Structures are given as C-alpha cells and as structure tokens.
C-alpha cells in the first residue's frame, strides 16, 4: 500500500493484509478497534486484530496497512504502545494509521499525542497516511450518562467516515501546536508517575482472592501472595485492575478522587437505550472545558436525529 506518487505521498492501493493493533485498559480503545474491523469487513476487507499487551511486536507480521489504536495518557499515547511500536521490525512498502482515543478530544494539550508514535513508525519504514482522535467516555472523576451514551452512539458514524477516507486514499495528518509538543515531551514524566500511582494500589478486606487483577494486568505488575494481590512498580495506570474487580476491593493510595466510586462498565453503558432527538443539550456543558467533545459530537454535518 506504500507505492509513492510523484509528490512523495503513498498512492492508494486497497490493502489485502490489514492489521489492527490496540491497547485498552478499561475497554474504550478495544471497542473502537473492533468497530473499525466491522466497518472494514463491510468493504470486504478482513482484519487481523492484535492486543498489544499480549503480542510480541516481532511477531506482528507483514501488513499492507497497520493501524495503531491507543488511549491518551499524559498528553501522549500510552507507554506500552510506544514501546511496542519501537520494537516492531522494519518493513518495506507498508502504510500506517494512528488512532488515538481520549475523553477530551482533539484539543490542546493533546494535539501532539501521536507525534512520538508516528516518528517511531516512520523509522521502521511505514508511511503514516492518516491520524485521528476518537472520543470515548471518561473513565475518571465522574460519569455523565447522557454524554457517554452519545459518544457510544456516534462511534460507528465517526469510524465509517474514517474508513471511507482511508479507502479513498485521503491523507490526514495534523500539525500539532508547539506548546502541545512540549506537553507531550513532558508527558514522559507522567508515564513515570504512573509507576508511583500503581505502587500505591492495594486491596481491601473485601478482596475474595479471585486473582482477576493479577491475571489481566498488561504489565504483569500484580502478584498474588497468600491470596492477596501485591502491586509492583511497573504500572501504566490503565485502571483495568480497579474497575474489573468484582468486589470493588482495589483502590489507589494516590489520586483516589479520580476513581469513579461505582465503577466504569463500558458494556453496561453500551446496553443503554440510544438518545432521543434533542436529549443531549450542549448548553449544559462549559464550552471551554468540553470544546473537544462538543466539536467531535457536533461537527458541521450532524448525525441526524441524535443531537440538538
């Protein structure tokens, strides 16, 4: 898919081998990735889906088009994704797409979140042809049921447009703000801070020793001792252990305020009824704080029958 035109950009060739590689802590990025696979399938293109947490990058295989899906942590893609891409083997004549997932949208300070990963992909021989932010429900601080339902409901339409862009050969690359590049560079310290956050996590007496947290930790940062989970210092703050605990027994010693008390269950959100026309009122949201989300949900071409 990486045949170059005279202007240096890849000429469009329909991919025969498509790999979708994702990392997901609480399920949002996985849902996005699976939605892309479904949309590509409707165009007769099958996808190989890779969970970055469980897959050796050296065994990623050759693909005409590699798509990377990652949540945004500390103004850049999560460290496990950047490290995985850095270990990919070099490839000839392949293209790549980078899809970031956040609750804030494509606004400052997140506009440079994909820069590091794009640079790594280019160093491996990939031509990065498209990048985009997908907005999904916020898994910190609090839940807004209507907003979450709106974001989940609009996901297929947003993915459908991106897939159409990719298959039509449309090039989509952003120009991050300089200050956001600085935020992204500083975000490396945020990745380091996640280790401290993880080391502060502990299990309460409600723990039933099921071991789900240890089994599913993408960093293998949790070990069971005498039926009690113990947390190491390689955490990436994905929150999977906290929200997947059936007894709500796991909590951090730091930033407790950020954890949603009654949990974060994306599956349950997805099963809620769709919004009725006009049910989501933008006037109820601070236009400065929620600008990225509103711009995502309310583009010039509104999805019919969903939003005011």
Image: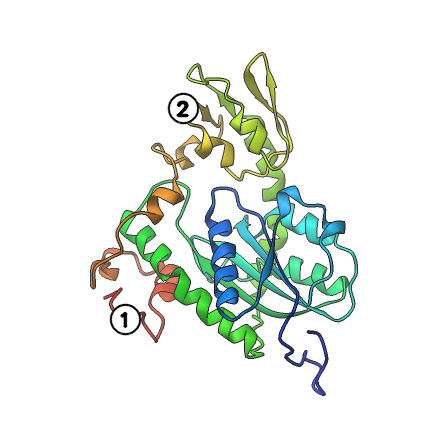
Which residue lies at the image location 68% right of the left edge and 80% below the top edge?
Answer: 9
Label 2 with label 1: CB-CB less than 8 Å = no
* Res 297 quadrant in image: bottom left
Quadrant of the frame with the C terminus:
bottom left
The x and y percentages for residue 27 are 47, 45
Quadrant of the frame with the N terminus:
bottom right
Left or right relative to 26: residue 17: right
What colouring method underlies this structural image? Answer: rainbow
Within 10 Å of the Cα at label 1, are there few (<14), some (14-19), or many (20+) other Cα atoms? few
The x and y percentages for residue 3 are 72, 79
Q: Which is nearer the N-term, disc 2 or disc 1?
A: 2
Q: Is residue 241 above or below residue 57?
A: above
Residue furthest front in the image: 44
Residue 75 visible in the picture: no
The x and y percentages for residue 292 are 40, 61
Measure the alpha-carbon separation of dots 2 and 1: 41 Å
For label 1, the SS is loop
Q: How many marks?
A: 2
The x and y percentages for residue 128 are 65, 68
Which residue lies at the image location 35% right of the left edge and 49% below the top edge?
Answer: 270
Residue 304 visible in the picture: yes
Which residue lies at the image location 64% right of the left edge and 71% below the top edge?
Answer: 15
Q: Is residue 238 above or below residue 31?
A: above
Q: Which mark is residue 247?
A: 2
For label 2, the SS is loop
Q: Which mark is residue 180?
A: none
Which residue lies at the image location 41% right of the left edge and 35% below the top edge?
Answer: 259
Residue furthest bottom in the image: 6
Residue furthest top in the image: 226
Within 10 Å of the Cα at label 2, are there few (<14), some (14-19), or many (20+) other Cα atoms? some
- Name the one closer to the observer, 281 or 279: 279
Q: Which mark is residue 304?
A: 1
């Amino acid at each position: 898919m990486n045949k170059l035109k005279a202007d240096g950009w890849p000429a469009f060739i329909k991919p025969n081998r498509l790999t979708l590689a994702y990392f997901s802590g609480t399920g949002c990025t996985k849902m996005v990735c699976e939605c892309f696979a479904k949309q590509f399938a409707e165009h007769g293109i099958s996808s190989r889906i890779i969970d970055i947490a469980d897959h050796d990058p050296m065994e990623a295989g050759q693909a005409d088009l590699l798509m990377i899906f990652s949540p945004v942590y500390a103004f850049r893609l999560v460290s496990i994704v950047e490290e995985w891409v850095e270990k990919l083997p070099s490839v000839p004549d392949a293209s790549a797409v980078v899809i970031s997932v956040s609750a804030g949208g494509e606004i400052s300070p997140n506009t440079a979140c994909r820069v590091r990963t794009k640079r790594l992909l280019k160093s491996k021989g990939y031509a990065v042809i498209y990048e985009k932010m997908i907005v999904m429900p916020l898994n910190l601080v609090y839940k807004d049921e209507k907003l979450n339902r709106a974001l989940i409901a609009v996901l297929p339409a947003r993915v459908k447009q991106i897939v159409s862009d990719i298959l039509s050969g449309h090039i989509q690359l952003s120009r991050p703000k300089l200050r956001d590049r600085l935020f992204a560079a500083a975000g490396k310290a945020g990745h380091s801070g996640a280790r401290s956050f993880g080391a502060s996590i502990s299990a309460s007496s409600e723990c039933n020793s099921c071991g789900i947290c240890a089994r599913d930790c993408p960093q293998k940062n949790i070990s069971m001792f005498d039926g009690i989970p113990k947390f190491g210092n390689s955490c990436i703050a994905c929150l999977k252990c906290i929200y997947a605990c059936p007894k709500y027994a796991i909590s951090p010693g730091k930033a407790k305020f950020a954890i949603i008390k009654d949990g974060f269950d994306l599956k349950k959100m997805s099963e809620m009824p769709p919004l009725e026309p006009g049910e989501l009122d933008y006037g109820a949201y601070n236009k400065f704080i929620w600008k990225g989300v509103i711009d995502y949900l309310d583009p010039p071409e509104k999805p019919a029958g969903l939003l005011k």
